Image (tube, helix red, strand yellow):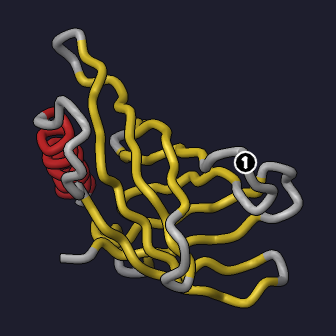
Amino acid sequence: MKNVLTLFVSLIVVLLFNTCLSQTEYDKKVLGTWTGTISGSGIATKNITIVITKSNYISNNTVHEGICEGYSMVNNGNKTTFTGKIMVEADMPFIEVMEPKTSNKNGSFHLEFGCFTDNGIDSKLTCGTWTSYDKTLKRKINIRKKV
């Protein structure tokens, strides 16, 4: 089971890296769209869409980490852009991105690609948190990659 899990996670990482390595400049090509919910901090659960529109990897013949850009929309409202990095730790890819600090309603995301469920790892499920810059709000995110 452990070998199957390792192979599965490696396949996700290779597919993600190959997609990202092919991008050399911003061309608005959508690399992924995820939809789901954001909840917590005493605020009603809302729908959220996260789109990664660009990703470039820094490499010296080895993929280490990548720069990514994109946007999020809550309840299909205004797009809030973000920039950050895609990284891999313990064979699990994740992103750390920051929205512009131009509004006190903005913050940062930490999202892990592939989440543990009662049935094992769900490769299409991404989960994590959004935290406001002033640290007063921390919300849980559960999103699924659209096919």
Q: Could you tell me which secondary element the residue under label 1 belongs to?
A: loop
Name above or below for residue 44 compared with residue 27. Answer: below
Q: Nearer the viewer, residue 70 or 135?
A: 70
**Splitting the image into 4 quarters, where does residue 52 fall?**
bottom left
| Extreme residue in the bottom direction | 44
Residue 31 location in percent, x, y? 23, 55
Front residue of 17 and 27: 27
**Where is the C terminus found, in terms of image quarters?**
bottom left
Please, what is the three-letter code of the amino acid marked with disc 1? Thr
- For the point 74% across and 78% down, which residue is it? 40
Residue at 20% over, 44% down: 27
Specify the quadrant of the image occupied by residue 77. Answer: bottom right
Residue 123 as seen in the image, left or right of residue 138: left
Quadrant occupied by the N terminus: bottom left
Mark 1 = which residue?
A: 102
Comparing 72 with 3, the one in front is 72
* Percent coordinates x, y for residue 101 in the rendering: 71, 45
Q: Is residue 30 above or below residue 86?
A: below
What residue is drawn where x is 33% and y is 41%?
91
Are there few (<14), some (14-19), or many (20+) residues within 10 Å of tag 1?
few
85 over 122 or under it: above or below? above
Q: Is residue 143 left or right of residue 2?
A: right
Q: Position of residue 67 (x, y in %)?
A: 38, 33
User: Which residue is at 50% across, 75% downward?
Assistant: 142
